[in-house]
Image (tube, helix red, strand yellow):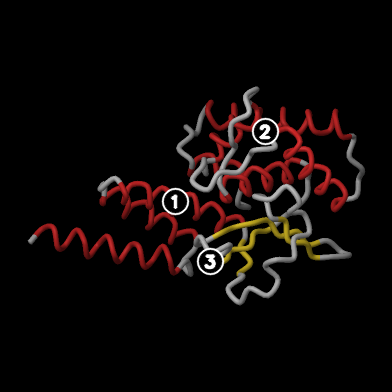
């Protein structure tokens, strides 16, 4: 069975599998229908992707926050809200954009960078069409076809599983900061199950194991 990005991202975000997942899929579809009604996209994937990117920024011009939401349900609710609050961090904005692209039948990947903009690990959208390859920097209003990461030696192409793994990894970091080490270990393990090559998650798993061992002495 193929990996369902939207469903798996919602489950990783803590949404209940029964009615909760269906409700947020309906909200994503509502956002997509709003976009189609207002922007009248063409059938060209690249043109549609650009129109969607611009539309999201028009709707929420202050949408990025460094330590903002990263769970898919939270960023969907923030994008749909009538207020002007931020929508999410780089992970949250990339999740929302990639899921909306998927709703529009456009396949997109992810780029992972070890230290972007001098603030640490970072993700953004990577779109490959028959004509071109495009980096889409979701945290910048002019980030479509962004060229600032092209020479980054750490750029790694991720797929849907790796993107969902980053949700679990972010949860692990949250639990670690709160001192909930067993929950942190569980989330890091879930991240590694989906992305066995996620070395940051593996390192954090080892760090928590060591810390728990020290505290037992």
Disc 2 to disc 3, C-alpha distance: 30 Å
Q: Tag 3: Cα neighbours inside 10 Å, few (<14), some, or many (≥20)?
A: some
Residue drawn at x 61%, y 47% is: 95
What residue would you read off at disc 2? Answer: 28
Question: Residue drawn 35% across and 63% down?
Answer: 204
Q: Residues within 10 Å of mark 1 (few under 14, many from 20)?
A: some
- From this viewpoint, is residue 8 visible? no
Query: Which numbered disc, 1 or 2, marks the residue closer to the eye?
Result: 1
Quadrant (top left/top right/bottom left/bottom right) for the C terminus: bottom left
Query: How many numbered dots are placed on residues in this image?
Result: 3
Instruction: Name the spot of residue 133 as percent of width and height, x first.
Output: 79, 65
The numbered disc on residue 170 is 1
Callout 2 secondary element: helix
Of helix, strand and loop, which one carries label 3?
A: loop
Horizontal arrangement in the rendering, residue 8 relative to residue 33 (left or right):
left
Please name whichever residue, 201 or 80, is drawn nearer the observer in this view of the structure.
80
Q: Which residue is mark 3?
A: 115
Sequence-wise, which precedes: disc 1 or disc 3?
3
Compare residues 82 and 214 and report the one nearer the observer: 82
Give the mark nearest the N terminus, 2 or 3. Answer: 2
């Amino acid at each position: 069975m193929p990996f369902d990005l939207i469903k798996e991202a919602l489950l990783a975000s803590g949404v209940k599998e029964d009615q909760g997942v269906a409700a947020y899929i309906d909200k994503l579809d509502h956002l997509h229908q709003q976009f189609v009604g207002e922007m009248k996209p063409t059938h060209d994937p690249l043109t549609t992707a650009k129109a969607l990117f611009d539309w999201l920024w028009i709707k929420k011009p202050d949408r990025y926050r460094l330590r903002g939401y990263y769970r898919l349900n939270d960023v969907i609710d923030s994008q749909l809200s009538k207020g002007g609050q931020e929508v999410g961090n780089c992970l949250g904005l990339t999740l929302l954009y990639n899921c909306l692209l998927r709703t529009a039948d456009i396949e997109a990947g992810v780029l992972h960078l070890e230290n972007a903009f001098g603030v640490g690990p970072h993700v953004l959208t990577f779109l490959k069409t028959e004509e071109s390859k495009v980096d889409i920097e979701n945290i910048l209003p002019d980030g479509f076809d962004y060229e600032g990461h092209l020479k980054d030696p750490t750029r790694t192409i991720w797929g849907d599983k790796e993107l969902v793994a980053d949700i679990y990894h972010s949860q692990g970091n949250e639990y670690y900061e709160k001192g909930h080490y067993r929950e942190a270990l569980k989330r890091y393990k879930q991240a590694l199950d989906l992305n066995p090559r996620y070395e940051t998650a593996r390192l954090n798993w080892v760090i928590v194991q060591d810390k728990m061992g020290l505290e037992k002495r």
